[in-house]
């Protein structure tokens, strides 16, 4: 079992989209897969739930973390909060807005290692994907401590490039202090425009600096927004679309490197 975290402190770079589509492709290939949504915005949760289900209950990760703070008299395991999605082999530990309220209490009681402990006791999965908030906060640190691999979405602008260096320093610090098994598996170029000069120039510069830019780029497409609206990752929404093929290529590259 490999646990991956998708992380970038910059918002709008495709963390939830990449998390859910990578997980969905693995599940479609028969891998028993779990998505953990640690972002209180709950975009991954909405993407993987039935689109008729608008509920954002305090179960899932909010329930798990609430238990750690003593909000329940019944002792639960992480597996008790897992829910099935409409897609075969794909399960979800959902997010909810209540996670925002819990973060300060969890951090003050130093619960950052509890996710790693809970995942170590979780059986039955071939792959775990963790979606994170666009901030280096309690939940992101917990995910980086729990994971073995880190993927960094990058959307090819200079602001993203400057933020990338600070992000890599943050990951290196957590690796040194808390999780020596953590490695940056790669930088995922997202919303790539092949005909534009700046994106290719930025990618070339990152590679010249020795940064691990993955070869499988993800294009910009309105179809991904439509798949969000329909709550169906691309492999289920439009199997033959170019972007679906790009997600397959990225998944294959990661599996080959595992």
Image (cartoon, rainbow, N blue to C red):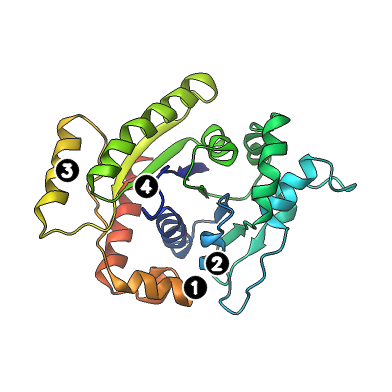
> Of helix, strand and loop, which one carries label 4?
helix
- In the rendered view, would you say 208 is above or below 139? above
* Residue 114 visible to the viewer: yes
**Label 3 SS:** helix
Q: Which is more N-terminal, label 4 or label 3?
A: 3
Residue at screen point 48% across, 23% down: 180
Q: Residue furthest bottom?
A: 52
Choose between 129 and 138: the one closer to the eye.
Answer: 138
Give the labeled residue for mark 3: 202
List the residue tagged with mark 1.
Answer: 231
Q: Residues within 10 Å of mark 3 (few under 14, many from 20)?
A: some
Relative to 113, is 237 on the left or the right?
A: left
Number of residues whose C-alpha sits closer than 10 Å to that of mark 4, classed few (under 14), some (14–19) or many (20 or more): few
Residue at coordinates 84% horizontally, 47% vertically from top-left? 71
Foreground residue among 102 and 251: 102
CA gap between label 3 and label 4 equals 26 Å
Q: Nearer the viewer, mark 4 or mark 2?
A: 2
| Residue 16 x/y as whole percent | 45, 56
Secondary structure of the residue carrying tag 1 is: loop
Discs 3, 1 touching: Cβ within 8 Å: no
Reading the image, the residue beneath label 4 is: 255
Q: Earlier in the sequence, mark 3 or mark 1?
A: 3
Residue position for label 2:
46
Residue 154, how many percent across, how many down?
A: 30, 47
Secondary structure at badge 2 equals helix
Picture layout, residue 200 above or below residue 108 = below
């Amino acid at each position: 079992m490999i646990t991956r975290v998708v992380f970038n402190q910059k918002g709008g770079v495709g963390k939830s989209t990449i998390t859910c589509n990578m997980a969905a492709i693995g599940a479609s290939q028969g891998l028993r897969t779990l998505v953990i949504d640690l972002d209180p915005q709950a975009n991954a949760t909405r993407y993987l739930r039935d689109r008729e289900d608008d509920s954002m209950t305090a179960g899932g990760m909010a329930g798990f973390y609430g238990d750690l703070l003593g909000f329940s008299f019944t002792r639960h395991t992480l597996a008790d909060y897992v829910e099935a999605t409409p897609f075969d082999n794909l399960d979800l530990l959902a997010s909810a807005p209540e996670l925002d309220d819990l973060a300060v209490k969890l951090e003050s009681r130093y619960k950052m290692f509890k996710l790693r402990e809970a995942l170590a006791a979780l059986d039955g999965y071939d792959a775990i994907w963790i979606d994170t908030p666009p901030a280096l906060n309690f939940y992101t640190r917990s995910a980086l401590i729990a994971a073995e691999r880190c993927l960094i979405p990058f959307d090819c602008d200079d602001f993203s490039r400057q933020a990338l260096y600070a992000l890599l320093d943050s990951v290196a610090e957590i690796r040194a202090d808390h999780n020596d098994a953590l490695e940056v598996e790669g930088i995922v170029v997202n919303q790539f425009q092949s005909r534009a000069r700046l994106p290719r120039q930025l990618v070339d510069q990152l590679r010249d600096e020795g940064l691990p830019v993955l070869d499988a780029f993800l294009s910009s497409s309105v179809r991904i927004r439509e798949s969000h609206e329909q709550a169906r990752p691309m492999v289920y929404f439009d199997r033959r679309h170019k972007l679906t093929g790009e997600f397959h290529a990225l998944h294959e590259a990661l599996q080959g490197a595992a």
